[in-house]
Image: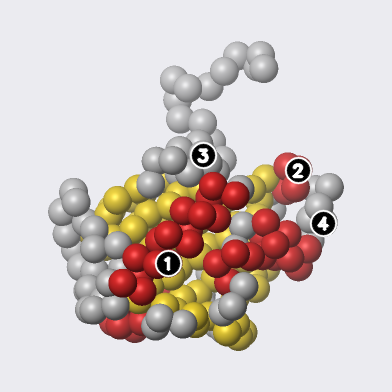
Amino acid sequence: MKKLSVLILAIATCFIIASCGGTTITGDPQSYSNADGSLSIELPTEDENSWVIKEDTPSSILDISDKGDTINIRVQCVSKDQVKPVATDLESYRDYSMINTLGDILADADISDAKADVPEFINKSIINSFSMSGDVTGTVLYMESDSCYYTYFIMAVDKAYSSNESALLDSVLTLREITEVPAGEKNDGKQ
């Protein structure tokens, strides 16, 4: 977790340095998945270099940035069974996530309640917007489905966020919980 926090702080620093941030994301929707295949999202994609997936993150996290590194999206899927000892409901999951995943990033951020649409399979959500020094702004959504908790974190240089807010929040609606193993990958019941 410490390495992940350092990486995220480094990304935030890049956002501050790249404060020109007038990036507009365009293109056809392209699907992106985390390494363990538990979720996917769609983002407007102009070409194969539009988005860069950070490969050194835990397999439950999709960590993706635009090619200019002015927009960062992190989506984490955690099984309810996996965090049951520390999170028995969405509020306790949010508290756990704030302390263990986002605490270093949002420690000095101004956080407020926000609204956004969520996918139909989501039963409950808590949505916050945030702003930080250096003109960095974003949205973090904590969501609960029947089997998982999600953290959907969007952070961008202020100009990049404001010019792409609609597309970024629309990407939340494309979140897909992947619960079925594709044919040919099913195991024979052995663990």
Q: Which of marks 1 and 4 is nearer the N terminus?
A: 1
The residue carrying mark 1 is 12
- In front: label 1 or label 4: 1
Q: Which of marks 4 and 2 is nearer the N terminus?
A: 2
The residue carrying mark 3 is 59
Q: Is mark 1 on a helix, strand or loop?
A: helix
Q: Earlier in the sequence, mark 3 or mark 2?
A: 3
* C-alpha gap between disc 3 and disc 2: 17 Å
Give the percent coordinates (x, y) of residue 126.
65, 73
**Picture quadrant where residue 87 is located:** bottom right
* C-alpha gap between disc 1 and disc 4: 31 Å
The residue carrying mark 4 is 88
User: Which residue type carries mark 3?
Assistant: Ser
Quadrant of the image for the C terminus?
A: top right
Give the percent coordinates (x, y) of residue 181.
51, 31
* C-alpha gap between disc 2 and disc 1: 32 Å
**Is the Cβ of the residue at disc 1 closer than 8 Å to that at disc 3?**
no
User: Which residue type carries mark 4?
Assistant: Thr
User: Which residue type carries mark 1?
Assistant: Ala
**Is the Cβ of the residue at disc 2 closer than 8 Å to that at disc 1?**
no
The residue carrying mark 2 is 81
